[in-house]
Image: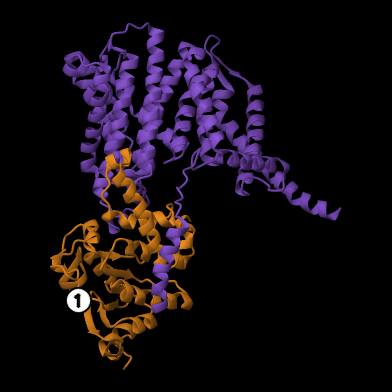
Chain colours: A orange, B purple
Amino acid sequence: MVLDVRGLTMDFGGLRAVDHVDLQINDGEIVALIGPNGAGKTTFFNCVTGMYTPTAGSVTIQKPGTDPRTITNMRPHLITAQGLARTFQNIRLFPEMTVLENVMIGRDCRLRAGILGAIFRDKRTRAEEEQVVLDAYRALEIVGIGKWANETAKNLPYGAQRKLEIARALATEPFLVLLDEPAAGMNPQETRDLVGLIRRLRSEHNLSIFLIEHDMSLVMTLSERIYVMDYGKLIAVGNPAEVRKNPAVIKAYLGEDVSA
Amino acid sequence: MSDTAQTIRPTLNRHVDFARRSLLISIWFAILTFPIMVMRADVAARSIVWRWSNLVWVIAGTFVGSWIWRVALERKKNGGGNPSGPGSRGIAAVRARIAILTRQRHFTLGSFIVLAVVIGIFPFAGGMWQTNVMITALLYVVLGLGLNIIIGLGGMLHIGYIAFYALGAYSYALLNQQFGLNFWMALPVGALIGGVASLLIGIPVLRLRGDYLAIVTLAFAEITRLVLENWADVTGGTAGIRSIPRPTIPGMRMTLPQTTVFIYFTMIALVVFTIFVVRRLENSRIGRQFVAMKEDVIAAQAMGVNVAKTKLTALGLGGVWAGMAGVVFAARTTFINPASFSVWESIIVLCTVVLGGMGSIPGVIVGALVLILVPEYLRAFVQFRMLLFGAILVTMMVFRPGGIIQKRRRAYTISSVEKQQAVTESGDLSIEG
């Protein structure tokens, strides 16, 4: 089990955005979290990655081959250093930096150089910097946008920006990647490419994938297990076929009156 | 014939439109300036003198000015002028030639040598007044480059920067008065005090951003000034501290002009040192963290950047240069009092960064030189000095909002061997996937 979330709850004032959610992801699994708009999916992501401090509950991660660690209340950059990387629903690149520099920021938590290293440029710092460029470029090649390495990030086409976000997440050396609506705004061809990419990440880079997505065809073809949320509560868990038939899910998506 | 008629017609219409708008503007401006430009109270005669000729000048001047302004704005909107126009083609050709020249090594080297010679001759050719003006300008270059670390790289709108300049100046003055520390010993101490103070002030404002940070830092600058003013036992209050020794080479007696030249070269050395350090910081992991934090804090921390530490690093580093500049300032004027460290000074430093180009080292240098030297050399037009200065600032911000010299991101070269290696590695994957 790479991720074990127990009883996660998040209140915003009087509003309970996430209500006692339990969720587990096994090593090498592709798991999707779906639900209508406003169900609390992104809030759940933000709690897991430390962007929000959850009101109650616990988040435990276990990097394959190591002991489990509780990361509840840990600060986001430390969680990332533990091996949990994420992308954002509304692309959050560093728009004025080059594509390569964006990915180099992803490497940041694996670097050691400090102020003195920057000023004196000792041998170790120089070696580290050379290695960063190389590692970052490799991450770009994995998602297939290496040719744009020196472009300014904001000038990339939309699909490539999404890929760049994934490359940046990969650069942090994660074992679990959280993708928040990776296919949003993509055309069918780009979505197919994305499915290929996510499968490759799992099979070739031994990553576990946890994604939020509204594109049902992508969710159904890609994920092994699906969690469904509505009004902050978990309403169903299961494989695609089970979830598709689940009356609670159909009710949440289509409303009361429609009979399954 | 009809072709030319078609191209002329819209141009003509546009200029008619310009004329109409310019006329309206000039009437508005005439009304606005009516009391000061036209009316004058003659105290002796107890009557008002009406200077109608001034009205004509104001209207005519504003009309022409507004017209030029509109034409210039339109050229800017069309991407720096009509591409087929002869004038812009000339500019483009010059730009291209400059670009080719700067890529040649001996040209870069040559311009460096010329610059070094000019810098070296300047104090001897220019005289005392010129040298003193240049020292002031260089102080602002150092301040600008320091603040640039905080604002241009780190993206934190800091308006209290001058407080650390004051701390540097007072630490030299007081350490000299109480313990007899000389300039060279005080320089690193001032730098340390500036940096540490900036860091300590940074801790409580870590959560603040943008305008909130600006207000808090502004308040901090005022608090510092008020403390310096009222803690009279130590700081001498509004009277300040007098007869602070000028920097010297130990064991040498120097006349005042010699000292001035010496301070000038000290400042040049400090500027070169600052450029060196800031450049290295910029092209390092720290520099990347700064820029990432400036562009998107949330994404930066999600990608593993320790934002709190990065902010404090930027603040601390910025404070170091303010402290050093402060020590030189105290040594150079030999007299300091709180009035030298008003918020206005902070604003000037902020202006050098914004005017020159945020995050760009040559930009900030040019910005500081323009901002300090222009008002000095405009002293000939005493009455209109600040007015002209304001006009230059506004014009700059409209036509080059990114600053005089805009920051360019560095491009990395990846050797073809490494590229091939990366491609094959990921290529293997895509075949199976």
* Pick the front one: B209 or B295: B295
Q: Secondary structure at mark 1?
A: strand
| Relative height, residue B432 to residue B52 (above, below) | below
Label 1 packing within 10 angstroms: few (<14), some (14-19), many (20+)? some
Residue B281: % across, % down: 35, 41
Read off the residue under disc 1.
A23
Residue B213: % across, % down: 30, 42
The reply to whether residue A219 is in sight is yes
Please indicate whether residue A195 sits to the left or right of residue B172 in the image.
right
| Relative height, residue A224 to residue A94 (above, below) | below
Please indicate whether residue B265 sits to the left or right of residue A172 in the image.
right
| Relative height, residue B165 to residue B308 (above, below) | above
* Pick the front one: A220 or B93: B93
* Pick the front one: B201 or B22: B201
Q: Label 1 sits on what residue type?
A: Leu
Residue B397: % across, % down: 51, 39
Q: Quadrant of residue B433?
A: bottom left
| Relative height, residue B6 to residue B240 (above, below) | below
Task: Count all numbered tags in the image, as a single digit.
Answer: 1
The residue lying at 30 percent from left, 65 percent from top is A86
* Pick the front one: B425 or A58: B425
